[in-house]
Image (cartoon, rainbow, N blue to C red):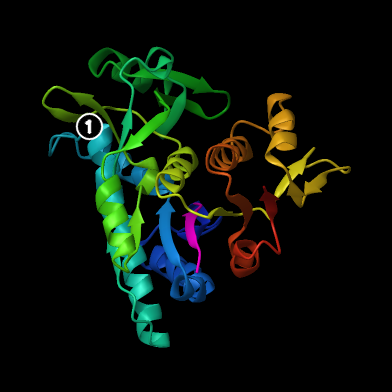
Amino acid sequence: MERILIAFGGNALLRNGDDSSYEMQLRRATEAMEKIWKVILGNEVIITHGNGPQVGNILLQNERSRDITHPMPLHACGSMSQGLIGEILITAYDEMKTRYGVSKDAAVIFTRTVVNEDDEAFHNPSKPIGPYYSSDDAKKHMKESGWLMKEEPGKGFRRVVPSPYPVDIAERSAIFSMLTSGYLPICVGGGGIPVIKTVSGYRGVDAVIDKDLASSLMANILEAHKFVILTDVDGVYLRYGKPDREKLARISAGDLRKLYTQGSFPGGSIGPKVRAALEFVERNHGISIIGSLDDASNVIAGKSGTVVY
C-alpha cells in the first residue's frame, strides 16, 4: 500500500468544447473517478483539484449581479468553488462506490493555504482572473474597486491578483486524521483559500495560489510516496509544439532542475507543474509523475507520463 496524492487538472471537470453546466462537470468527474477507483481502493489516496473555470464563473456572476446583491471578495469566491467542486467530486465518487461495491468513504475538507504577508507577489500582482473587460469598464473597475488591470492584446483587459507561494496548510491535521482513519480526503481545492496568519487567527486575502505548488506542499506534509499530476498532456516535453520535441519519460530531479533553471518549460502551463514535481522530490525523496488523465492508471503506476525520481 502506498500513500499517493493525486492532483486533478482542470480536464477532470471540463474539457475543451464542454459547456460549464453542473451536469457536464459531474459527467467528467465520474469519468475521472472511473479511471482511479482501483488505485483508491488499494492505497491511501488524497485528491486535490483546480478551480479555474468554476471560480471564473463565480466572479462573473459576482459582477453581473452586483446591483442586486453585494459581491463577495476573491478569497470567498474561492471557498465557494471548493464547495461546488467538492460536491461534484464526492457525488462522482459515490457513484463509483455503488457501482463497484467500494467501502471507503470520501470527505471534502475545506482547506486554507497559508502564505506570507510580505511575499513579493503582493507587490507585483501577475495572475489574471475573471472575464475580459473593455478599456472603459477596466478603467471603471480600477477607479471604483481599486483593481489592477492588464491588457491582453486582442482580447481586452483582465484583473490581475497576487500569486503568493504556499508555506503551510491550515487544515493539515484534519486532512491527516481523515486519511489515517481510512477516508479519501478531497482537499486543497484550487490551491486552497489564501490566508495570512494574524494575532487573532487566519485572515483571507485576495490572491490565487498555484494549485500544483499547494498540492506538492500537501504531499510533502503527508509524507506521500508519490505525487501524481493528472492533466491534459501525456508528459513533459522539451521543445513542446515543435517538430523535434522530445518527451522526458524518466528523469532525475537534478537533471530536471537544470532544465527548469535554463528556462526549458513555459511558465503558463507545464512550468508550474514541473516546479511542483521537483519540490516534492527534492524535499521528500519520493516520486513525482506528470501525465495524462486519460491514461491515469498507467501514469500512477509509473508506466506512462514523466517520472521524476
In which image quadrant can residue 190 be found?
top left
Q: Amino acid at mark 1?
A: Pro
Asked if residue 271 is positioned above or below residue 145 in the image, the reply reads: below
Could you tell me how many numbered marks the image carries? 1
Residue 255, given in percent of the width and then of the height, sits at 75, 35
Asked if residue 245 is positioned above or below residue 46 in the image, the reply reads: above
Q: 99 or 287, which is in the foreground?
A: 287
What span is in magenta?
Answer: 1-9
Residue 147, given in percent of the width and then of the height, sits at 32, 19
Asked if residue 178 is positioned above or below residue 52 in the image, the reply reads: below
Q: Is residue 231 something that shows in the picture?
A: yes
Residue indicated by mark 1: 73
Residue 245, given in percent of the width and then of the height, sits at 83, 43
Q: Is residue 109 magenta?
A: no
Residue 126, given in percent of the width and then of the height, sits at 47, 22
Residue at 70% across, 51% down: 306
Q: Is residue 61 something that shows in the picture?
A: no
Residue at 26% across, 48% down: 173
